[in-house]
């Protein structure tokens, strides 16, 4: 079972999780991160590192975030691999508590 980056990451893109990933399974898009489900080893190191609780185990996803399983899988084949932490997006503080952000990005 892989971990999944959810909607909370959109327009924030904190990368604390990237630093602890032992298999470099994070991929970076313009507005958020995704986890490649075939590369994730389910180590759970990333989940507590996310300051906005955007990462969940696939089997513990909130019901309104289930579609992010497919979104992570699809976009991890398109986005570039990221292996080192970066500064969050300039919009991170503004968007970190906003819900229903999916429409803000192109899938």
Image (cartoon, rainbow, N blue to C red):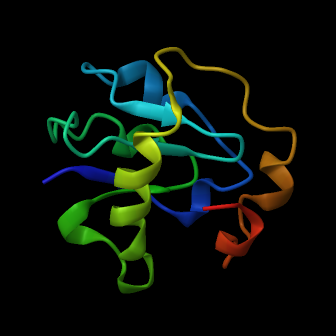
Position of 88 with respect to 5 (left or right) is right
Task: Give residue 2's position: percent from left, percent from top.
Answer: 20, 50
User: What residue is rendered at 57% in x and 53% in y?
Assistant: 52
Indicate the quadrant where residue 44 lies: top left
Q: Quadrant of residue 76?
A: top left
Relative to 103, does residue 10 appear above or below in the rendering?
above
Q: Quadrant of residue 14?
A: top right
What residue occupies the far bottom of the structure in this picture? Answer: 63
Name the residue at the front extreme.
78
In the picture, the quarter occupied by the N terminus is bottom left
Which residue occupies the foreground of this view, 54 or 27?
A: 27
Specify the quadrant that holds the C terminus. Answer: bottom right
**What residue lies at 71% left-to-right and 66% top-to-bottom?**
97
On screen, residue 82 versus residue 97, left or right, reads: left
Q: Nearer the viewer, residue 12 or 67?
A: 67
Residue displayed at 28% across by 34% down = 45
72 vs 86, left or right, is left
Residue 86, given in percent of the width and then of the height, sits at 66, 20
Counting from the top left corner in percent of width and height, residue 32 is at 62, 46
Question: In the displayed structure, would residue 85 be above or below residue 103?
Answer: above
Residue 18 in the image, given as x and y percentages of width and height? 45, 26
């Amino acid at each position: 079972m892989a971990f999944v980056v959810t909607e909370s990451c959109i327009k924030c893109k904190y990368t604390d999780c990237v630093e602890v990933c032992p298999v470099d399974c994070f991929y970076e898009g313009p507005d958020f991160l995704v986890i490649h489900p075939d590369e994730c080893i389910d180590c759970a190191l990333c989940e507590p590192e996310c300051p906005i609780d955007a990462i969940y185990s696939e089997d513990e996803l909130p019901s309104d975030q289930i579609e992010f399983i497919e979104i992570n899988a699809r976009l991890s084949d398109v986005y570039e691999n990221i292996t080192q932490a970066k500064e969050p997006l300039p919009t991170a503080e503004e968007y970190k508590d906003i819900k229903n952000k999916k429409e803000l990005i192109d899938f």
